[in-house]
Image: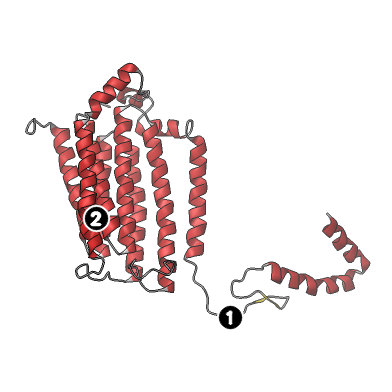
Amino acid sequence: MTITNTTVPLEWFLALSAILFGIGLVGVLTRRNILVIFMSVELMMNAVNLSLLAFSRYLNSMAGQAFVVFVVTVAAAEAAIGLGLVIALVRQKPTVDTRDIEELKD
Amino acid sequence: MPFDLDFQQIVFLALGFVAVVASIMTIIQSNAIYSALFLAIAFFQLAAIYVLLGAEFLAVLQVLVYTGAILVLFLFVVMLLQLREGPQIGDARRWQAIIAWPLGLLLAGELVAIIFSKDVTTQMQQGITNGAVTVGQYTPANTVAVGGNVQAVGRVLYTDYLYPFEIASLILLIAVVGAIILSKQIEPEGEERILPSTGINIGRTGIVGRKQGEEFAREITPMLEAEHGAHAAGAEKGGQQS
């Protein structure tokens, strides 16, 4: 097994992470479909995972990778619960548009 | 510098470019199925970048859990619901999109500008030399020495992070129970199910609850008393006291 050091600078990984996080944030703010909002949240989580792994690599620490394992676990749990909520919501009112879901507003 | 790229940097730029384009397509597609498929492309690019970072285990986890489980679940729900999003243009709250796009891109631009202007690598090196930043023991050579990335992650996960790991399993258990309860079909009214051999109505759920239990006890006690006399009543009394 050969040992190779990555030649890509740390800043590049962090910049990609920041760009993906920004795109995910725009998705959360602009979209009206509750499923696409969920997907944007998943994208933001992945951006954070990327920066955790980049720092883990450059600091020779496995703690970042352990954190990413937990983030993935929580993301899976969140997706299961979130999609269950969406299905329960659609059963009450057949829409996934957040503009139509305003029962708790008043 | 811009045209003096080695192989890894070219691979990173290609993967990163596709990831960014796929992410943008995810949030501008009006059809949620296309959004999910573009998100799958972005996740695959990120998995490849994880391999580039030497995190092979997390790359496999990314493909298995994110694209294999979460996104398939998303696609499943999108196709199950069969709902189309309304038109994006002519929206009464379109001002929100007009504000959100520049703000989101400004945030990303600011972050990128800070990352490059502050020179993170140099600051990290300074922190390592003056002791402010702790460097772990898992250099590439040490990772190979313990057997590889999977072994290294396992060692950390089952020693330093054992307690969080157990809590993570509890979170997954709660999520499973919650998802089952949330997506449980509520059965229509009027259906009654009779528990065999007792004639007791256990309702629509089929679960014997407290009410049914009390009813059962009321019906069964005289029978038992008749059959066993004072012996059964005494045993029940003793059972209540304990």
- Residue A56: x, y in percent? 33, 32
Residue B121 at x, y percent in the picture:
24, 27
Q: Nearer the viewer, residue B181 or B61?
A: B181
Amino acid type shown at disc 2? Ala
Label 1, residues with CA under 10 Å away: few <14, some 14-19, many ≥20: few
Residue B110 seen: yes
Give the chain letter at badge 2: B
Give me the residue at 39% from left, 30% from top: B152
The residue most toward the front is: A106
Q: Secondary structure at mark 1?
A: loop
Q: Seen in the image, is B217 located left or right of residue A93?
A: right
Q: CA distance from mark 2 to mark 1?
A: 50 Å
Give the residue number, with chain letter if any, for mark 1: B191
Output the chain of dot 1. Answer: B
10 Å neighbourhood of mark 2: few (<14), some, or many (≥20)? some
Q: Quadrant of residue B128?
A: top left
How many dots with numbers? 2
Q: Nearer the viewer, residue A18 or A51?
A: A18
Q: Position of residue A57 (x, y in %)?
A: 30, 30
Q: Classify the position of the N terminus of chain B by image quarter.
A: top left
Classify B49 as above or below A29: above
Numbered circle sitting on residue B100: 2
Give the mark nearest the N terminus, 2 or 1: 2
CB-based contact (under 8 Å), mark 2 and mark 1: no
Is any atom of residue A4 visible in this view? Answer: no
Callout 1 amino acid: Glu
Please, is residue A19 above or below residue B134 in the view?
A: below
